[in-house]
């Protein structure tokens, strides 16, 4: 009886952790999905998440308000995405190279400003972080209650954005315009719609979501900022979009798979199973590589993804 109870408790704990860990990945992946549907590879996602995490932490620390930190993080991601969009849409610089530059910029700036703001960058001040907000009645349901309905507000927002993005892309005229920009931008141009404006809006939205994902890591759960705390989540979000076939609900499913593996390795370490922790840490990324191998075809990708549009 006790063993059954213990196993059930562990399963609920892993499932709840999966939902929590999925939050920053899902936010970034949904933003990247919209950007890629418009035809732009936002390869600077990692840098945008990292700067969002840092600015969110710094703003929350200076203002004393976690929501100020979240707003600042989102604006930071949007601002970096606007710079990225100017480079790749207006100047038509190669998208992958520009994204790598943005990632390097985010890593360098966040570390530099961290050292400038705090004398001991290795031991930054701890700030309050968002507490779980149980949903009345629903959080009391057996099993699913603590898993789905006892999470942080940003987690609820991330999961609600899945149907919102689906509705935007597949049930609205503007969503059709975004998808057309990624598949047949010339058709938009002929109709007098600015392809550049559509892509700018999609990329900036993606940066905003990446910044919010970064904010979750610092002010949402960790209560402090450490260099490179995104730990490859921006890259993983890009892989999730590919594994999810550029569709919101499939992106959600892929996010949950990677998050479950991460939550599982944390649980295995916590209960002391004798497996080298390096192997456990590798699990989500090994699966990510396998997913890339399986989804190597571009059959479901927007036709003009990564290709700058120019009027003939």
Image: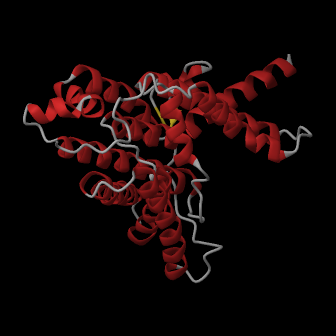
Q: How has the structure been colored for display?
A: secondary structure
State the image quarter where residue 51 is shown. bottom left
The picture places residue 122, in percent across and down from the top left corner, at 65, 73
Q: Is residue 123 visible?
A: yes
Q: Nearer the viewer, residue 146 or 199?
A: 199
Q: Is residue 130 left or right of residue 306?
A: right
The picture places residue 209, in percent across and down from the top left corner, at 38, 45
Q: Is residue 68 left or right of residue 270?
A: left
Q: Quadrant location of the N terminus?
A: top right
Residue found 41% across the figure and 26% down from its top: 248
Residue at the extreme front: 312
Residue at the extreme right: 274
Q: Is residue 48 visible?
A: no
Callout count: 0
Q: Say above or below: 105 vs 206.
A: below
Q: Nearer the viewer, residue 140 or 49?
A: 49
The picture places residue 261, in percent across and down from the top left corner, at 69, 33
Residue found 59% across the figure and 58% down from its top: 229
Q: Say above or below: 98 vs 123.
A: above
Q: Quadrant location of the C terminus?
A: top left
Q: Nearer the viewer, residue 35 or 214?
A: 35
Q: Say above or below: 249 vs 33.
A: above
């Amino acid at each position: 009886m006790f063993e059954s109870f213990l196993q059930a408790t562990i399963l609920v704990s892993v499932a709840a952790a999966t939902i929590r860990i999925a939050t920053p990945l899902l936010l970034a992946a949904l933003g990247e999905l919209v950007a890629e549907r418009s035809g732009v590879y936002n390869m600077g996602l990692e840098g945008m998440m990292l700067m969002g995490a840092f600015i969110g932490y710094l703003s929350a620390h200076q203002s004393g308000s976690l929501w100020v930190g979240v707003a600042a993080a989102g604006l930071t991601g949007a601002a970096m995405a606007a710079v990225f969009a100017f480079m790749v849409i207006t100047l038509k610089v190669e998208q992958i190279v520009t994204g790598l530059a943005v990632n390097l910029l985010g890593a360098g700036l966040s570390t530099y400003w961290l050292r400038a703001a705090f004398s001991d960058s290795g031991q930054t001040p701890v700030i309050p972080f968002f507490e779980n907000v149980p949903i009345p009645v629903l959080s009391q349901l057996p099993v699913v209650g603590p898993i789905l309905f006892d999470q942080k507000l940003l987690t609820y927002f991330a999961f609600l954005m899945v149907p919102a993005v689906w509705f935007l892309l597949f049930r609205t005229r503007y969503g059709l315009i975004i998808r057309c920009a990624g598949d047949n931008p010339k058709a938009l141009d002929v109709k007098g719609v600015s392809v550049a404006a559509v892509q700018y809006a999609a990329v900036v939205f993606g940066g905003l979501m990446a910044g919010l994902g970064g904010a979750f890591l610092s002010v949402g759960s960790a209560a402090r900022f450490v260099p490179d705390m995104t730990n490859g989540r921006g890259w993983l979000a890009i892989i999730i979009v590919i594994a999810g076939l550029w569709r919101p609900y499939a992106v959600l499913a892929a996010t949950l798979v990677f998050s479950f593996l991460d939550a599982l390795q944390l649980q295995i370490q916590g209960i002391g199973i004798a497996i080298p922790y390096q192997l456990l840490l590798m699990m989500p990324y090994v699966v990510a590589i396998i997913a890339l191998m399986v989804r190597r075809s571009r059959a479901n990708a927007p036709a003009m993804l990564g290709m700058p549009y120019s009027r003939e």
